[in-house]
Image (tube, rainbow, N blue to C red):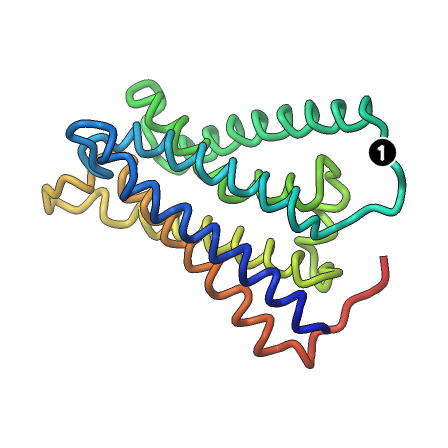
């Protein structure tokens, strides 16, 4: 495994982490009374848009899974539209799963959906950028020994960390501490964000530490 590829992965993850940090630093300069807790829904929108933009730009620049085939413009448009459909379906599915796990069904619908969008941004969007709207490739990557590159390993780690972070973030909600950050879905979205950032940091470190043991099947 070439160290240059790990460095590319690390640089991409550092930029992604910085984009998360900027969503808490830059908006207060332009929006009055902005705060992650006080105006949480606005922050959810800003964070989702920022992470989406950064991921797309990084994918265009780095091209982690280059294709040797020439792709027509019509094919690119079709692929983009499929990605949009996949992302929207992911938001709906996450919304339904979150409700099944105890989120309000009728009340706080907007809050729940925006949290689902954030979670889809941390997981599904990352997969769409790397793998495209290829469900078979998704199944391969998230199956046992299915990773074919360090980028696949990165997907596994960041996706799992985001979901686990959101799950742990739900623990404080039913407690009677009466803290502002216990309002739905603040703790869950913060947990997902911390999990995503942790995954971005852990992934290249884990891959570098295990680089001699990692072997990938040819495509």
Count of marks, rendered view: 1
- Name the residue at 77% across, 43% down: 136
- Name the residue at 55% across, 66% down: 204
Q: Nearer the viewer, residue 185 or 74?
A: 74
Q: Which residue is mark 1?
A: 71
The vertical placement of 125 against 39, above or below, is below
Left or right placement of residue 89 versus residue 117 in this view: right
Q: Quadrant of residue 135?
A: top right
Q: Position of residue 63 (x, y in %)?
A: 70, 48
- Name the residue at 75% across, 72% down: 215
Image quarter (top left, top right, bottom left or bottom right) of the N terminus: bottom right
Q: Position of residue 210 (x, y in %)?
A: 62, 77
Image quarter (top left, top right, bottom left or bottom right) of the C terminus: bottom right
Q: Nearer the viewer, residue 48 or 145?
A: 48
Left or right placement of residue 13 versus residue 153 in this view: left
Left or right placement of residue 25 versus residue 121 in this view: left
Left or right placement of residue 22 versus residue 63 in this view: left
Q: Position of residue 75 (x, y in %)?
A: 81, 26
Q: Quadrant of residue 174?
A: top left
- Name the residue at 66% across, 69% down: 4
Sort mark 1 into few (<14), some (14-19) or many (20+) by Cα contacts within 10 Å.
few
The vertical placement of 13 against 59, above or below, is below
């Amino acid at each position: 495994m070439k160290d240059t590829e790990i460095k590319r992965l690390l640089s991409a993850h550092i930029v992604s982490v910085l984009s998360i940090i900027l969503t808490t630093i830059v908006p207060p300069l332009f929006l009055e009374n902005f705060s992650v807790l006080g105006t949480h829904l606005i922050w959810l929108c800003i964070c989702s848009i920022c992470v989406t933009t950064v991921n797309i730009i990084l994918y265009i620049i780095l091209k982690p899974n280059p294709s040797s085939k020439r792709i027509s413009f019509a094919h690119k448009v079709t692929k983009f539209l499929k990605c949009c459909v996949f992302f929207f379906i992911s938001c709906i599915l996450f919304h339904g799963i979150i409700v099944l796990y105890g989120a309000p069904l009728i009340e706080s619908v907007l809050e729940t959906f925006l949290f689902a969008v954030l979670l889809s941004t941390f997981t599904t969007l990352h997969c769409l950028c790397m793998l495209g709207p290829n469900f078979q490739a998704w199944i391969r990557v998230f199956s046992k020994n299915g990773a074919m590159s360090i980028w696949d390993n990165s997907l596994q780690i960041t996706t799992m960390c985001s979901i686990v972070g959101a799950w742990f973030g739900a623990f404080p909600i039913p407690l009677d501490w009466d803290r502002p950050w216990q309002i739905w879905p603040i703790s869950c979205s913060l947990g997902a964000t911390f999990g995503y950032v942790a995954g971005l940091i852990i992934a290249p470190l884990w891959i570098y530490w295990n680089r001699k043991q990692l072997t990938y099947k040819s495509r």
